[in-house]
Amino acid sequence: MTPGKFITLEGVDGAGKSTHLGFVADWLRGQGREVIVTREPGGTPLGETLRELLLHRDMDADTELLLMFAARQQHLAELIRPALARGAWVVSDRFTDASYAYQCGGRGIATERIAVLEAWVQRGFAPDLTLLFDVPPEVAEARRSAARTADRFEREADSFFSRVRNAYLDRARAEPGRIRVLDARRSIDALQDDIAQLLEELA
């Protein structure tokens, strides 16, 4: 059986990626694919428990990073790898690029330390395609304020999200073939036209 593909959606909180998650899944289903939609942190019962801690409990930055990768290990073992092995396509709201953006860019943890955890947990595994929804921090903040009550990450200052955004863009420049940057200030229809084209290329 041909293995499935792994697609991730990334961006600062408020970039609008969640708006397009369903579109990606529906487009792939329209091509006859089995699609699993998931998220990080989360995706498994243990991962969802860790998500609650990560979003709502104060903790040291290193603890935050380790819990993120603990949830990711369970996610890979319990959901992502088995789904891909049976030929399903997995679409995830965030993956390891978010750790480099938030824990490295935002929190200031050294890239090398995150890379060690990535190598240990993923053993070379990476998404086939990453859609990076990019917006200036002030646009993202306005969207967050209008949409929901802020969690622990969403309460961070604009300077934090500027660092997160810059870290994402640095990763996109380093891996332009995998990480495709989308200007999330554009209309939903325009963005989804671009997304469909990228999915067509992958499929």
Image (cartoon, grey):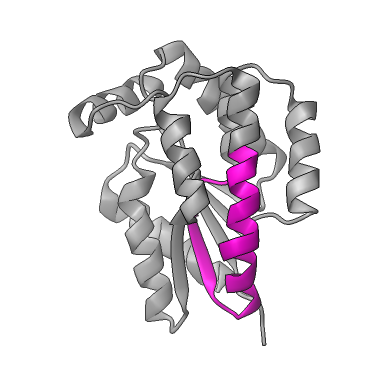
Tell me the residue at 65%/66% (across/down): 81
**Magenta-span inclusion, residue 196:** no
Q: How many marks?
A: 0
Horizontally, is 167 left or right of 141 in the view?
right
The structure residue drawn at horizontal position 21% and vertical position 34%, both measured from the top left corner, is 147
Residue 92 falls inside the magenta stretch: yes
**What secondary structure prevails in the magenta region?**
helix
Residue at 59 percent across and 37 percent down: it is 68
Q: Is residue 9 above or below residue 164?
A: below
Give how far across and how far down residue 54 sits, in percent: 48, 31
Answer yes or no: is residue 93 visible. no
For the C terminus, which image quadrant?
bottom right
Q: Does residue 86 lie above or below 201 as drawn? A: below
Give the residues drawn in magenta, as a range: 68-95
Residue 117 coordinates in the image, percent (x, y):
75, 38
Task: Find residue 23 and report its image quarter.
Answer: bottom left
Viewer-side residue, 38 vs 137: 38
The residue drawn where x is 79% and y is 54% is 124
Question: Dividing the image into 4 quarters, which one contains the N terminus?
Answer: bottom right
Q: Is 21 drawn above or below residue 153 in the view shown?
A: below
Residue 109: x and y, percent? Answer: 68, 20
Q: Is residue 28 visible?
A: yes
Q: Is residue 20 left or right of residue 197?
A: left
